[in-house]
Image (cartoon, helix red, strand yellow):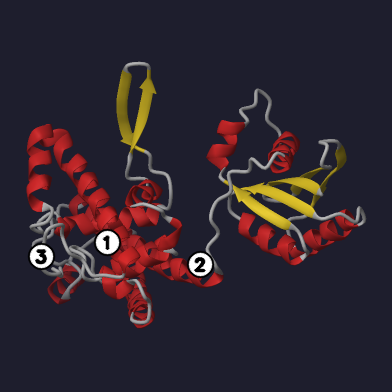
């Protein structure tokens, strides 16, 4: 078998081909598009041996993976952080990176990541694009608020973008070009509202048939948007052997520094999908008031003080939610706190 290391950049794909003994067979580059990858498969196919390849996780790696696997290769996408931990280098170039990946493949040491199937990828894209649009809408609204404050017009209404707020904005005398930017921002906000509403309708329709979403809706603090997002980001709950693994995947666990008798805890790792971490943190806004989490949440806030307490308590509650979600989805049961006589829905 041949082992290929692939280093992807914006305009080219560097590859390094090794045989089973570690001897270099071929080194070169290819264009990272469909035609270039097809020619790479033909070029390596002349050696008439099966190919195992490794490529670092980055934008475009999934496209390369899919195209080469259709050509008969076995391709693994490696966790970029773990690759750097396995093979730290004093000198780093694209060609050296490709050789390192080929060596890891040959030694069967590739820290491969889990690849969601196309259905899960589509679910993630819908949820993530909705969040992207919501953040753009929030940014435009914040810009309008800042413009009003800059010209001595603090917002006197609770909702500047409701009916009363729109009338107020129409009456305000703002100089150009600020008047034009406010009007353009309002137009964009209206367009985003329509797109978000359409996406939310699609998420609600698709979420009704999802096996995880109805269960997640029984969890405190999780409404249907967060339920769909969490379900999409988790994918298959069976790949997590324990609730701690799911919490670790979310990036909500603290970093650990141990040496001899020293044992220190640092900030959370923030590894794994940021959208799952965001959804769990968002859920704590309401879950922290649920009887199952309220007392511990308040104790943590009081123990650590006003500066660190609220944030640490929020992360702790989010981590406990991840544990509860693992038990719910693994057992196919709705939310039920430990010791509860019956299932308690949010």
Q: CA distance from mark 1 to mark 3?
A: 13 Å
Q: Which mark is residue 248?
A: none
- Could you tell which of marks 2 and 1 lies nearer the N-terminus? 2
Q: Position of residue 67 (x, y in %)?
A: 72, 64
Could you tell me which residue is drawn at 13 percent across and 33 percent down? Answer: 304
How dense is the environment of label 3, judged by Cα within 10 Å: few (below 14), some, or many (20 and up)?
few
Foreground label between 2 and 1: 2
Q: Residues within 10 Å of mark 2 (few under 14, many from 20)?
A: some
> For residue 166, what is the image quadrant?
bottom left
Between discs 2 and 3, the one toward the N terminus: 2
- Residue at position x 85%, y 36% in the image: 23
Picture disc at residue 121: 2
Q: Residues within 10 Å of mark 1 (few under 14, many from 20)?
A: some
Give the residue pinned by disc 3: 158
Query: Height in image: 218 above or below 36?
Result: below
Give the quadrant of the C terminus: bottom left
Res. 214 visible in picture: yes
Q: Residue at x 32, y 59 (%)?
A: 326
State the image quarter where residue 236 is shown.
Answer: bottom left
> In the drawing, what numbered circle is on residue 141?
1
Mark 2 or 3: in front is 2
């Amino acid at each position: 078998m041949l082992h290929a290391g692939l280093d992807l950049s914006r305009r080219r794909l560097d590859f390094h081909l090794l045989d089973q003994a570690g001897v270099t067979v071929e080194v070169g580059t290819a264009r990272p598009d469909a035609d270039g990858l097809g020619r790479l498969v033909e070029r390596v196919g002349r050696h008439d041996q099966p190919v195992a390849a490794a490529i670092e996780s980055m934008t475009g790696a999934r496209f390369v993976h899919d195209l080469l696997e259709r050509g008969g290769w076995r391709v693994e996408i490696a966790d970029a952080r773990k690759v750097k931990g396995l093979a730290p280098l004093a000198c780093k170039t694209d060609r050296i990176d490709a050789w390192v990946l080929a060596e890891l493949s040959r030694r069967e040491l590739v820290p491969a990541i889990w690849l969601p199937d196309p259905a899960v990828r589509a679910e993630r894209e819908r949820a993530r694009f909705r969040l992207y649009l919501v953040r753009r809408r929030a940014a435009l609204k914040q810009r309008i608020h800042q413009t009003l404050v800059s010209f001595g017009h603090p917002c006197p209404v609770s909702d500047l973008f409701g009916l009363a707020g729109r009338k107020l904005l129409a009456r305000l005398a703002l100089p150009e070009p600020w008047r034009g930017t406010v009007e353009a921002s309002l137009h964009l906000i209206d367009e985003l509202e329509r797109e978000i509403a359409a996406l939310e309708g699609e998420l609600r329709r698709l979420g009704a048939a999802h096996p995880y979403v109805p269960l997640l809706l029984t969890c405190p603090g999780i409404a249907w948007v967060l339920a769909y997002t969490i379900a999409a980001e988790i994918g298959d709950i069976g790949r997590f052997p324990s609730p701690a693994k799911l919490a670790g995947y979310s990036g909500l666990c603290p970093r650990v520094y141990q040496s001899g008798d020293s044992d220190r805890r640092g900030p959370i790792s923030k590894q794994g999908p940021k959208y799952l971490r965001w959804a769990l943190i968002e859920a704590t806004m309401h879950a922290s008031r649920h009887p199952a989490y309220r007392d511990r949440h308040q104790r943590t806030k009081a123990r650590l003080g006003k500066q660190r307490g609220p944030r640490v308590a929020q992360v702790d509650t989010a981590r406990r939610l991840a544990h509860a979600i693992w038990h719910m989805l693994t057992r196919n049961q709705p939310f039920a706190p430990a010791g509860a006589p019956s299932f308690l829905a949010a």
